[in-house]
Image (cartoon, rainbow, N blue to C red):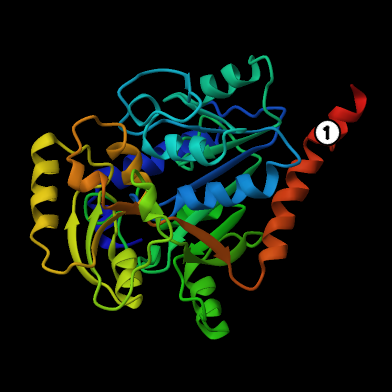
Amino acid sequence: MEFLDYINPYHWVMTLRNLAFDCGRLPSRMFDIPVISVGNLTLGGTGKTPHIEYIINLLKDEYAVATLSRGYRRKTKGFLIAPAGGDALAVGDEPSQIKKKFPQVTVAVDEKRVNGIEMLLKEQKPPQVVLLDDAFQHRYVKPGLSIVLVDYNRPVWRDNVLPFGRLRESARGIRRADVVVITKCPPLISEEEKRYIIRKLNAGADTQVFFSTVCYDELSPLCNPSMKGRKVGNGCEVLLLTGIARPEHLKRELERRGAVVTLMQYADHHNFTSEELSVIARRFSELSSADKLIVTTEKDAERLMGRDDIPTIIKDNICALPIKVKIIDKENKFNQIIKDYVRENTGDRSISAVGDED
């Protein structure tokens, strides 16, 4: 045990809490349908949303999928299902983003995940699979498959528990995971480095470890249809507007494409004020190049586009840069673990199989 752990009250609180769940002093509920948890050990920025979207893409054509999260920084309380088209104020930016991308998926929020799953199962068309977003420490639900994400750039074995570091609990907690994904890796990460990371993780003997990398898509205009097909080329000036934990990767991607980037960085899940929007508009107007645009993330776009006070100069020039993840080398094995778990715990009652009975 590290010296900082000995003197850290938060470490001991989390250790005792986990022990209470492990020995049954605190209840942990299992459900009769597949429940997949995607979480992490670290505060923010490991890529949970794109990995949730990856799993949705993997399952949505065969099963009725629902996602459940607490809906961080939403303006509502309790259980709520995202409306068609999403609503960042009601359900949070990430659930709203997921609902817009996957309208056929039920996207729900609830601070109490047990209640959230119970409510989903009471729906007229209950889900066959529930994906829990950011629920590794929410142990009142016992998932059938627990996936933990670790940022390649922030190794958990070099970090400390809050407040001395960014860990929500001891790095030893990773032994509860069934699958670990090292995220944001270089696409050409070597086998030697993979073996080193697996050794340092010290995960459970049966834990499967995978590596993923981020892929950036083409720019997507948010308001102005004439920007469709817009590219970032050499000399293009980009005002990069972010309210995410770590915008460095996005900035580097735009610079790789040839852009000269001015970063305006706000806190994760930041809700922009009218005054801040005015400052953003002024900063953009001050860029000297005729070839210029504003780029933001899909998550930030959810909080921006629901407003009615966005200056016209922003609406006319803003695009989002979508991202997705790719599992490096062992994608088929990763996919099969998820598909096998779901099939074995639904009795193979996929959408097509249920449809054949009607």
Seen from the viewer's position, the closer of residues 284 and 118 is 284
Relative to 273, residue 294 above or below:
below
Q: Is residue 163 left or right of residue 281?
A: right
Residue 266: give x, y in percent of width and height. Answer: 19, 50
- Count of numbered marks: 1
Q: Is residue 55 left or right of residue 151?
A: right
Q: Is residue 98 left or right of residue 72?
A: right
Relative to 209, residue 61 above or below:
above
Residue 89: give x, y in percent of width and height. Answer: 32, 27
Q: Is residue 348 left or right of residue 302?
A: right
Q: Secondary structure at mark 1?
A: loop
Indicate the quadrant where residue 312 lies. Answer: top left
Residue 84: give x, y in percent of width and height. Answer: 51, 26
Seen from the viewer's position, the closer of residues 262 and 353 is 262
Residue under the image location 36 percent in, 18 percent down = 77
Residue 230 is at least partly visible in this image: yes
Indicate the quadrant where residue 326 lies. Answer: bottom right
**Residue designated by label 1:** 349
- Where the C terminus falls, by quadrant? top right
For label 1, the crowd category at 10 Å Cα-Cα, with few meaning under 14, some 14 to 19 and many 20 or more, is some
Relative to 270, residue 184 above or below:
below
Residue under the image location 30 percent in, 37 percent down = 303
**What amino acid type is highlighted by mark number 1?**
Arg
